[in-house]
Image: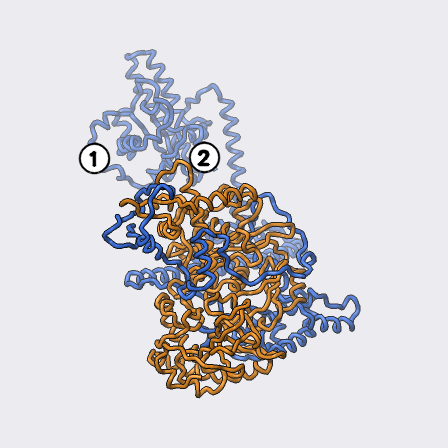
Chain colours: A blue, B orange
Amino acid sequence: MTRYGGMGRTRPKKLTSKASIPIVREDEIDLIDDEIQNALQQIETGVEKAEESEFHLQVAINAAAQGKVNDAHIPTPETLLSNLRYDELYPPIFSQPATYIRFSATVEDCCGAPYCLDEEDDVFLKIFNQKRDASGRCTEDQFEEVMSFFELTSRKEQPYACVDNSPLMSFEEFQQAMDPAVDDSVKRFAKDIYDHWKSRRANSEGEPLLSSPKVEAGRDTDDTDPYVCFRRREVRQTRKTRGRDAQSADKLRRLRKELEDARQMVALVRQRELARKEMLAIERQVFMQRSEVKDMKRKLNIKDDDEDLINQKPKKKPVEAPAVQRPAPQLRMPPKASTQAAEDLQLLDDVQAEKENEIVCDIRQNIAKHIKWNEGYVDFTRAPLSPSPERTFDAAFRPAITTQLPTPPSSESENMLDSALDTPSAIALRDKLAPHAMVLSEDTSKMPSFRRRIGRGGRLWIDRRNVASSCRVEMDPVKADRFKFDQDSDEEIEYDRDPYDTQIMQHRAIMAAKARDQAAAAQAHAQAQAAQAQAQAQAQRRLQAEQTAANNPPSGGQPMGSNPGPGAVASASET
Amino acid sequence: MGGRDEATGTPDPVEKGFATLNTIRIGMKAMVQKDGELRKAEILSIKQRKDGTAFYVHYVDFNKRLDEWVDSARIDLSHEVELPQPEKPEKKKAGPGNKAPSKNTQKRARAESRDISATPDLLTGKNTNVGKTQRPSKAGGKENRDDETPLNLSIGGSEAVSADGTPKPESDDVDMIDVSFTKDAKEEEKELMSREEEIERLRTSGSMTQNPTEIHRVRNLTRLQMGKFDVEPWYFSPYPASFSDADVVYIDEFCLGYFDNKRSFERHRSKCTLSHPPGNEIYRDDYISFFEVDGRRQRTWCRNLCLLSKLFLDHKTLYYDVDPFLFYCMCSRDETGCHLVGYFSKEKDSAEGYNLACILTLPQYQRRGYGRLLISFSYELSKREGKLGSPEKPLSDLGLLGYRQYWRETLVELLMETGRESMSEHDLSMLTSMTEKDVHETLVVFNMLRYHKANWVIVLTDQVVEEHKKRLEKEKVKGARKIDPARLQWKPPVFTASSRTWNW
């Protein structure tokens, strides 16, 4: 910012706003050059040009320039104390809060009915009330409420009444709007007050009784009419560019789409709720009819299994699929919704399953008892009566503790474990790939270990791990990988069950201990034992497969990946 | 009265002639007794009363707030009267009566109003016009302002009876203006007719009449009752037209509602529960409180406030609604509530960097230092915003005096601080939130900025030093009334882009 001070260009230095200017007293400097000072005086006052020359203003400005500020007085019309009864009209009710006032109510909120009656209304009201007893009188407040209603409604319904001379609204028209707007206690006066209102409006030549400043009404004279005020301001024009156009169009499109989506959603929700309602009605109907059937049965003394009183699960595939599929995507039925009904009702299947469960439980208890009896004993019989199914199920890989783990001769295992032999390395690899699955325990995971499981169709499998490290070495990892998924069925991958045959392991452990005792000399013997154990296992496996297949339909699978450990498996895989 | 030929001739020389009471017409300038002296005054309106004819006169070179109704006895017809100016092509045709001049004015006004919206300054520069209600330039669109102590300003020089009273010939251009005007012209014809009828009617009913475009030149309310005071309005304000007939208009002190009937007003008082401006209190000291009221949220109250303040602000326009403004209302407190003493409005978003649009101290509270507090508060807000600010122009006469006083005192106080040996205008500006322009001009106006021995110096003249001392003494006695920034609980309100775009 540079200013020249309004004087001849050549003479004074230019004064920049940042330049520091020394401050001096008047007596410290010489007389000044009047010419320059006069030139400096030409400063705009900011007052309207036409008024700058006004007499009193000039007097005041000159007085101020001469330091006589107090003389700089511009005369204004007088203000007097009013003889209004101020104290009555403005009661001293204000109490100042300790904190700053925060307030957002509007004038309308604070002033009650906008209509305020005048003397003319007083007369009307007096006459009106004379004819009535105390209970039927109309108070001033009620009167004003009704009048306000007429005024506001007609203003709303006929905003341009002052322009187009539309006739006053009829009482019938008002009545429609009155129901929600006006209190019942006041309505009874409405008709009488309407006549009064009408006559007052007629006297005022159609002008509203509620005085308000004139607003734009689309008249040609609006622009110059000094009484018209508070016009809507034109929205600021923004520069029109193609980009902005596209942007706006996009926004509008998106807005439209979103609104449309929302609408759609609401429509669908409605559809869903209707469907639910219908469902409830139907269920109720079913229930009623059933209770009738029940009564009839009692009456007629029919005894059957009462299956017709319990909900039959719809035939699995053919029925349920359409039933669930159709509504699901459309109605967005949460999965719960479809089962909800079933939860309320007993299904035949459930009942049957429960029965079966009881049986299974019974069996299990017996087995447990049996095991208890045999505690401390090892059943070395070929087909032990008490295979402990629980342990069978809950064990995962069990490490083979002995170093001289009696690996079955390959020829033999080939026979016994037919296809299982094809995959050991793959399994090993998989284990490696999913290390967390082996959180079995400490370092046992690195030891050779075995697991028994039941495969598809109830076949028994023995999985080995870390057994023949030679396998891994022999096999090219790439090749192994190639076979990784080369399996007969996907189910194998899932390891539905990780039961472990403890018996075999126990057996082996004992054998191994013996073997250790007998040293290497007994090696051959041990191998024979192992072979025997395998054979035994095979036999037992068959037997057990029958049993477990019966006990446990191949439903609840325990994926290997989430195998938490021996203890947890049992509970998870049961049921 | 001037004939057509003369009128269309050069307007420059003022036509003079003698008139009688019966031939006095609107637009003429006659000598009128005012406070014991004769002053030239323009006749703005004439009305018949029981006791004779009354004339509404504007004293040339006096502010409009001194306009008044005078009876015929005060008009000195022994002097020549100046005839209404210029263009009166139709004057003769219009026949006797005041229509012609007013019609002309109207036409001119129209023409001007077009000009004005484009270049208001030009217009004011020309000094042409007789009034026409001006619309503020749309671009700027602000509430115009004016203020009591301070300033009035108007965007188009509308009011204004120009000092020399000689309209320039441009106004005759009406016909050339453009095609779109043909319609207007027709309307004018219509208006003219209906106006004649109206005049007839009003004359018999005793009320004054006016060309619509000059109505606003005549104060429409007679007296105002507000709070404990009876106040005389200064200027026209667009209260409902029916209010012109009322002897007294009652204003509720708190909600600022208006009533032309005492009974209604009393009824209203019994219902109204407001006891302070309907906004948040942002400042409080022992003496006053400030409330911030949003024009958009409190439309009714702010409209009431604007109608009221228009009575005292000449150049304020109520053309547009109050939405884009915030109103900072200063109140004095007592047991009945917080009584509005004065206010200033401020644009929510001022493109020109104004920190104040209109400022007014209600007349019943004027000359007590409130105006200075208002100004001071507006700068306090600017300081809080970290901005420099200046009042919107033009200023009124009172506004100019008020601001100059505040500026001078503020600057002198800073310059007098002990230990100050030099200061730049920039520094002064940063410390006061005044714009550098205002700082500079204030220094110049009070003859404090001088060129001395090839260097600029700020001179603390004996005069300002003395005034400063006086002021300090006075404050010692009476206590200083100042805005204490620590008591201001306020963050600059933020308005989103959309709210600005849509004028929320």
**Percent position of residue B282, x then y:** 52, 48
Q: What secondary structure is found at the residue carrying circle 2?
A: helix
Which one is in front, A573 or A422? A573
Chain for numbered disc 1: A
Residue B12 in view, yes or no: yes
Q: Residue at x 38, y 29 (%)?
A: A396
Q: Residue furthest right?
A: A133
Is residue A458 shown left or right of residue A474? right
Where residue A99 sits, quadrant-wise, is top right
Alpha-carbon distance for marks 1 and 2?
Answer: 35 Å
Q: Which residue lies under the disc numbered 1?
A: A479
**Residue beneath the point at 74% across and 73% down:** A128
Q: Position of residue A306 (x, y in %)?
A: 59, 51
* Of the pair A286 and A388, the residue shown nearer to us: A286
Q: Which residue is mark 2?
A: A572
In the rendered structure, the residue with mark 2 lies on which chain?
A
Residue that appears at 54% across and 81% down:
B21
Whether residue B238 is visible, yes or no, is: no
The kind of secondary structure element at disc 1 is helix
* Nearest the eye: B219 or B328: B219
The amino acid beneath tag 1 is: Lys
Residue B449 pos. (x, y %): 35, 48
| Label 1 crowd bin: few (<14), some (14–19), many (20+), radius 10 Å | few
- Measuring from the top left, give residue B204's x and y in whole percent: 59, 83
